[in-house]
Image: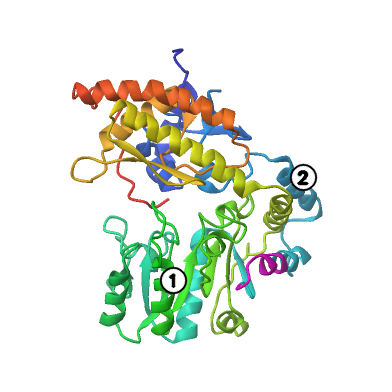
Amino acid sequence: MEKRKLEKSKLLLERAEKVIPRAAQTLSKAPDQFVRGVSPYAIERGEGCRVWDVDGNEYIDLASSLGAIVLGHRHPVIEEAVAKQRKCGTLFSLPGDLEIELAERISKIIPFAERVRFGMNGSDATTGAVRVARAYTGRDHIAKCGYHGWSDWSIATHPLRSKGVPQAVKNLTHEFSYNNLESLKKIFDEYPNQIAAVTMEPVSTVLPEPGFLEGVKELARKNGAVLVFDELITGFRLAMGGAAEYFNVEPDMACYGKAICNGEPLSVFVGKKEIMSVLDGQDVFFSFTYAGYLPSIAASLAMLDFMGKNEVQKKLWSTGNLLLKKYQALAEKYDVPTKAMGIGPHPIFAFKDAQGADNLALKSLFLQETAKRGIFTNCSNLMNYSHEISDIEEVAGRLEEIFKIMEEAVSLNKVEVMLEGPMIRPRNKPQ
């Protein structure tokens, strides 16, 4: 195997560490999430489902920009829409006409999206939804399941990431377990008439068990709480109407982003008119300069047009299911302690030790070898429309080489010895 050049990556990393905390703007992009000295530090360009690092090395991109890319890098339909809007302007001191057009389009696609507000990041949408739910119910406490961004209310329950969040805020957020209705019921029992919202990712690393989402909805309704689906990952991927459509469970509010405009900065939270009407006054505040950034809105409209004419979701399921099948077959063939999890549009490669904890050593070896073989992954993969069956077959061929290496390393108890750089640090979900 030809040795790759990484000189520019190494120099950029040295520069970054002098001026950028942790050398990255996003946790899962940080160099300690990859094997230093083997994985690239910076990506220079992308095209379709491929990216090239600053040293010119090519990779099949399975991470799809943490899910922000749903059609492919530099998809011509999106590029054309953004370029056209930029000729007219990007942001004005009054709303742009495209804002209304996109809000109307989303309302037609998603039945309960009677009112629509725009943000820039996922945390804007989830935090906006929580504020609206608190204002609507007059309550302060939140029951949550999953990761909902970096805001205080969301990260309050995280055992490693919540330093800097006031204890008073932590006391208002309560975590329940996925596929465990009793854990949610316990929160309602402990805080009667105090829960403003049940905020959750409708899909975790596994699918919801039969009746789980319906049970969550019923508990929320029974206890007067607003049900909020965080569809930052599932929205426009599982189906046009996201997980709510796919599982036929309608929440009161939902949050979208990432795939909504193929890499341009935009997030959306939507809800029933009765609930969202609290934003009609000035006492519930959700406002910032770049809300309604027009190139992003133009990109979203173009993306929705393209999805309406092409079977995008069907293809994401097809290529993703093939990747899951190929990966799991290799794990069983080579008897390596890893498994394929997740769903077609969001395949996950899981590495656990005998106690169920993250096997960081083996995961590090895997990431080291994928980088060397031109596969870009952080093990939480998100398919995009540019992935073809041939790309997945190519990935599978390279993965077989890696599984042979992992099998030998495990059998000889030399996983850490075979690492060519420091072991990765735990991520524990936040992006």
Q: Residue furthest top?
A: 2
Residue 252 higher or lower than 61, as above or below: below
Is there any visible trace of residue 20 in the rendered image?
Answer: no
- Front residue of 193/345: it is 345
Is there any visible trace of residue 216 in the rendered image?
Answer: yes
The type of residue carrying mark 1 is Glu
For disc 2, the marked residue is 80
User: Which residue is depicted at the point 39% across and 72% down?
Assistant: 215
Highlighted range, magenta: 103-112
For disc 1, the marked residue is 214
For residue 79, side relative to residue 19 (left or right): right
| Residue 372 is a magenta residue | no
Q: Position of residue 64 (x, y in %)?
A: 54, 41
Instruction: Name the secondary structure under disc 1.
Output: helix
Q: CA distance from mark 2 to mark 1?
A: 41 Å
Q: Residue furthest front?
A: 210
User: Which residue is depicted at the point 81% across and 55% down?
Assistant: 88
